Amino acid sequence: MPDLLIELFSEEIPARMQARAAEDLKKRMTDGLVEAGLTYGGAAAFSTPRRLTLALEDLLAESPTIREERKGPKVGAPDKAVEGFLRGAGIARDQLEERDTPKGAIYFATIEKAGRPAAAIIAEVLEATIRNFPWPKSMRWGTGSLRWVRPLHSILCVLSDENGTEVVPLDIDGIATGNTTRGHRFMAPSEITVSGFEDYAAKLKRAHVVLDPAERSQAIWQEASNQAFARGLELVEDKALLAEVAGLVEWPVVLLGDIDAQFLELPPEVLQTSMREHQKFFSVKNPKTGRIEGFVTVANRETSDHGKTILAGNQKVLSARLADAKFFWENDLRVAKSETGMEAWTAQLSNVTFHNKLGTQAARIDRIAALAREIAPSVGADADLADQAARVAKADLSSEMVYEFPELQGLMGRYYAEAAGLPQQVANACEAHYAPQGPSDDVPTEPVSVAVALADKLDTLAGFWAIDEKPTGSKDPFALRRAALGVIRLVLENKARMPLDRFFDAQLLRVESATNGALPEEHVSALLMQIAEHGVFGAAFNAVKDSISGLPVTAFLDLEKKVPDTSDNLLAFFHDRLKVFLRDQGIRHDVIDACIAMEGNDDLTLLVKRARALEDFLKSEDGENLLQGFKRANNILTQAEEKDGVEYSYGADVKFAEDDSERDLFAALAASEGAISTAIEAEDFAAAMGGMAALRAPVDAFFEAVQVNSDTEIVRRNRLNLLSHIRKVCGQVADLTRIEA
């Protein structure tokens, strides 16, 4: 069985596209070959800046012959029907076979498709792959119609086995396939003839081309680490940069240089970001001081002076870049240490629009600060510090350094807040309030940082909900799902106890009033105070409505209609995100639904605590059996209530019990109801589940011993009311009707 080698040789492919392109080449070729009947033993794809390579092992030499049997019309059918069948099958009439079937004589046709040589199939699939390759961006050159990421120079395509090597014939816009390639652009530009993959890889290595990107990455990292270690330094890990640099070179040559002493006092993150973004340099730090003192650049060739000229040129360019960074840093420090401090930057944000329907960044900061102050007691933070931190947390957006390097926002805020002499908790919040931005990010734990991070994300969500810019399907341009997940993680990982619904109402009211001018500020303040007291918008609205003279009733009525509905919708969105989050932790969606149906479902910590306890209980034997007993009781009760048109919700009396199991169930329910309610009040859900477990045996015994729908009407009603009591007692823990059997 032959092996197949394909190489598409071009001008330099952008590093960010190489890995995906290699996988696309592999998938499109293998899918096309398999669909055409050519199976293979193994496949591997590789990429360098100038080539995409695919190697297939043990490919079939030709596709198998396929025999297909088709059932046609009945014998004696109209000629047009028979002729149509013949055309579809591609056979003559004398090739039809008549067979007797239970439905009479039927025409059958046997169609045979002969196998085809592998070379012919490969040529077809490769041409389709090249002409329809899914580059993010592509170009045309010359007069041809072919599009490629960069001009395509040659196509190597050979089949090889023990009998020799065969070039697969193909011509695409004047580029004919062959068995040759080229090595390194400068160090070995001559043409290379190859006979198979092993020969190809070996000759490329001798021609100063490392084919495998993983091998290039490993070589870069190993050599850079060794050179740094030899000088008592340490290479700063950067996997993304390593992958990018490995896509920029075919023959990596690692060079270690020093950073000019005048730049060593810059924050290490500034040095690292400047070198990574502008020069693609790795940072090298002193492990004793943590300072960035050196850099690693990776050249694409060896030189007679061992890279000295290359290194000198890079150091010169780097010094110019770092001079800019130093200028930004020193200017920003002067502002931060001035009398106005970071407030000067915050004032500038009044000219920066956050969203055309949500006002400026400065207005948003006011809302965040107010909310952070309200959240602070729930997370154990000082309200004044939370307010102060929220007002300076985004000030660095106006700084020169963040303007140049946006990815340093927050981090530079911490440096500037420290320079301004602000409390350390405030400075830390400047950096931490953006977190977590992804599922792998750490969650802030310092109370002030938690308060500001929650306020920032909740204001974003409330704002976009207020203007009806919610995520739809796979579209989420404002990353609102990520913001909601961030809130969930902040609340749960810090075990915060906070009623989200109240904060939704407050922030929606602030957004509505700020963007629409719905209420004067004094009325907004009064309503927010009532929301804080009552916890929900409706009660707060009624309290304010009766206590403020000259109330703009129309404005209040508009808010009364919009805010609660929007708040409920936002809470439902949080519940959906919580289901996704907990499902990854092994908690079933129906268990979460059963707990969401209970009072206090906007307290995520309480909700999850209840859900975990219920999940554990339902996994136990007592839980499984009690759930079946509960569902049986609920089904019988529901059917009886529908049939009788009444609600059996009270009046069960032990004096009408006819069986010991009945009397035992009355006693068990009385004992469990008190135990469960006490445990729920103490938020001891494990104990509440224990109270439920105590009902398992008496419920089982009851259903085994008695018939609920007794012929005696008074006994029947009493037993139905007893079932209602079961539903009521169990319903203290969760809405078990939502649990799937």
Image: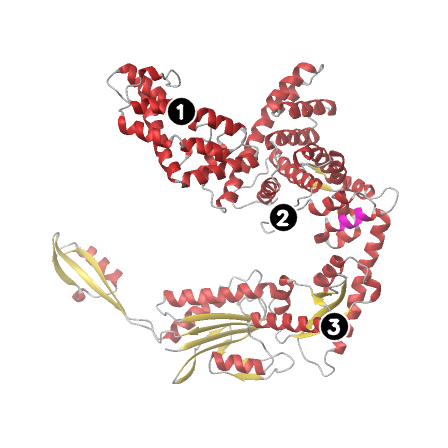
Q: What amino acid is labelled 3 in the image?
A: Arg
Q: Which of marks 2 and 3 is nearer the N terminus?
A: 3
Distance, label 2 to label 3, CA atoms, is 36 Å
Identify the residue at horizontal 65%, vertical 74% (top origin): 223
In front of the other: 414 or 29: 414
Distance, label 1 to label 2, CA atoms, is 48 Å
Task: Check the image and report above or below for 68 versus 163.
Answer: above
Q: Could you tell whether 657 is left or right of 9 in the image? A: left
Mark 2 lies on residue: 437
Q: Is residue 281 visible?
A: no
Which of the two marks, 2 or 3, is nearer to us in this view? 3
Q: Which of marks 3 and 1 is nearer the N terminus?
A: 3
For residue 506: magenta? no
Distance, label 3 to label 1, CA atoms, is 76 Å
Mark 3 lies on residue: 231
Q: Give the range drawn in magenta.
A: 412-418
Crowding at mark 1 (Cα within 10 Å: few <14, some 14-19, many 20+)? many
Mark 1 lies on residue: 669
Secondary structure beneath label 3? loop
Which of the two marks, 1 or 2, is nearer to us in this view? 1
Q: Where is residue 132 in the image (x, y as percent from the top left)?
A: 49, 63
